[in-house]
Amino acid sequence: MNEEVALTPTLKAVLSEFDGLRYRYTSARRLRVDLPSDALPAMLELLQGRAGYAHLSAISCVDWPDDGDFELVYHVWSYTHQNLVSAHIRIPRDPGVYLSVYDLYQPAGFFERDIHEMFGVYFEGSPDMEKFILTEWDGPPPMRKEFDSEGFVNDHFTWQEYRPEWLEEIEEQGGGITTRPEDIRL
Amino acid sequence: MRAENYEAVRQPPSNEYELNFGPNHPGIEGNYALKVKLHGDQVVAARADGGYLHRGFEKLMEGRLWIQNLALVPRICVPDPAPMEVCYSVGIEDIGGLEAPERAQWLRVLQLELSRMASHLFAFGGHAATTGMYSPMFWGFADRDLILDLFEELTGGRVYHIYNIPGGVRRDIPEGFLDRVTSVMDYIESRLSDYDNLLFTNQVFVDRARGVGTLNQQQALEWGVTGPNLRATGLAFDVRRDDPYLVYDQIEFDVPTEQAGDAWARTLVRRKELVESIRIVRQVVERLPSIPGPIRCPIPNPLAWNLPAGETYTRVESSKGELAYYIVSNGGDKPYRVHVRGPSATHAVQVLENLARGSRLEDVAQIMFSLDACPPEVDR
């Protein structure tokens, strides 16, 4: 969109090191970079070392089952240039293994652990791939698109109708919940 | 629940012992646990244990309409819910190519700053309580209640406001509201000297908090620390100023810093931010009457709204640090993916573990409260 925003010379030098890399400014301080997955650790190393992108804001994972891919997005922020680079890579869903960037950015440890738990992506070299949130969960990684949480609930739990006495008393007087839940259409 | 997770573990004889700190403990914010290994009262290892507040928000959001999720997002962080709404709404506006009218943006700033103040009053009151001083906590809660009264009047909700919608805010200010905001601001400002006497310059508290949980600027940057905790190490970075959103670029405020990087410095930064927030709210009160216009832009039928395909990464400065939403739309009426990056994702796990290691047991609670870690934000 905002193609006229100029890259800083260091950023331009870093990005020109890689083949098959595309970038565009999505707004004044947001640069989207798409690159092959094997080039990402090297690019982050250059971004951090040469261009001053010291802060890993987050790693996001998006599941694209139709393409057979996981998309990993590394958001890095530069305190000096006040610019955020979002580096997008795709890795195959099967086997879903990628390299850890923990030795570059320590916060990656938690984000990788979270993605491992929720999507089942394994990060080689990450210091800690133990479960954090779903300690007692043996099922499939729940954030994958094929995991249907509502279906899981229907299979494993029974619905209970909630009709306390006080509600019936109110209803006898003409009040209470007049629309049945199944009649609510959104 | 599995029995083996709750059984005593036989250990070889050792001078070290393990202690479960939480998940139900007055020194822990929310339901969260730290498993600490102790030698005497010295912490030799600490491991964060979360998940007690996991409600699966990110998954739930994928199954609900764009607009329905507004009732979910504030619940991701209980003490400071406003930035969640704003961040999510701004993200939708970004993908959908909408722009909130100027008046709505000022109203959002008002909501955000009031929420920041409420959260800070909560945070340093809680910090004081971990050192055995309960009066600042009660005072903070009582003063926070005045802000909640304002929220109730403005939005209808005291804790969860659900005030924002994509494209603007739900309602305009009631008659005479700004006068009441001003009087609450004057009152809180007049209370600051009392807080100073009771807490911030109280030698008991200063001695107790100084030198506890110290991190220097380099460590803070390496560990991904943001917000007041980063500013307490001397780096003046604030998303509001350096990556501005809404109308923050038209507002005058300073980014207060401290140098020491310990629990005391972190709390002092929050106290200074309270002053800045009062300053911002006063500017909003002054400017708002002269800003005409609608409080929201027209949006399609929210019950059948297919947002164009796209993605965005929106960031705001919450009271705890950098809050970001990564939102992906595939052109449907529901989000394809929402990733919530709360500031506590770093503060409550790696940073807390690192700072707790080597500290003394009685300081662990203080470290957690001084980081203002918010467990529901980690668990989501």
Image (cartoon, coloured by chain):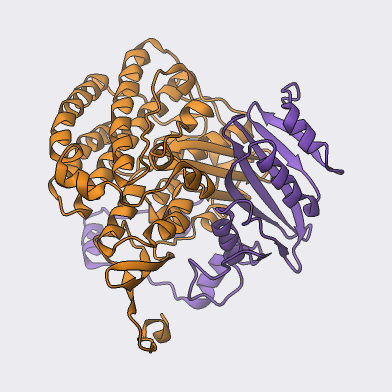
Q: In this view, does B379 lie above or below A33?
A: below
Give the left or right position of residue A170, taking residue B82 as reference.
Answer: left
Which colour denotes chain B?
orange
Depth check: A25 or B197 in front? B197
Depth check: B312 or A156 in front? B312
- Shown in purple, the chain is A
Q: Residue furthest right?
A: A19
Residue B17 image offset from top left, x and y in percent = 33, 78
Residue A59 image offset from top left, x and y in percent = 61, 51
Residue that appears at 22% across and 19% down: B179
Depth check: B373 or B115 in front? B373
Q: Is residue B47 above or below residue B94?
A: below
Give the left or right position of residue B232, taking residue A156 as reference.
Answer: left
- Is residue B22 visible in the rendered image? The answer is no
- Count of residue discs: 0
Based on the displayed image, in which of its 4 quarters is residue B21 positioned?
Answer: bottom left
Residue that appears at 41% across and 45% down: B74
Residue A161 image offset from top left, x and y in percent = 37, 69
- Is residue B261 visible in the rendered image? The answer is yes
Based on the displayed image, in which of its 4 quarters is residue B2 positioned?
Answer: bottom left
Q: In the picture, which quadrant includes the N terminus of chain B?
A: bottom left
Residue A109 image offset from top left, x and y in percent = 57, 59
Give the left or right position of residue A166, taking residue B163 as reference.
Answer: left
Depth check: A168 or B38 in front? B38
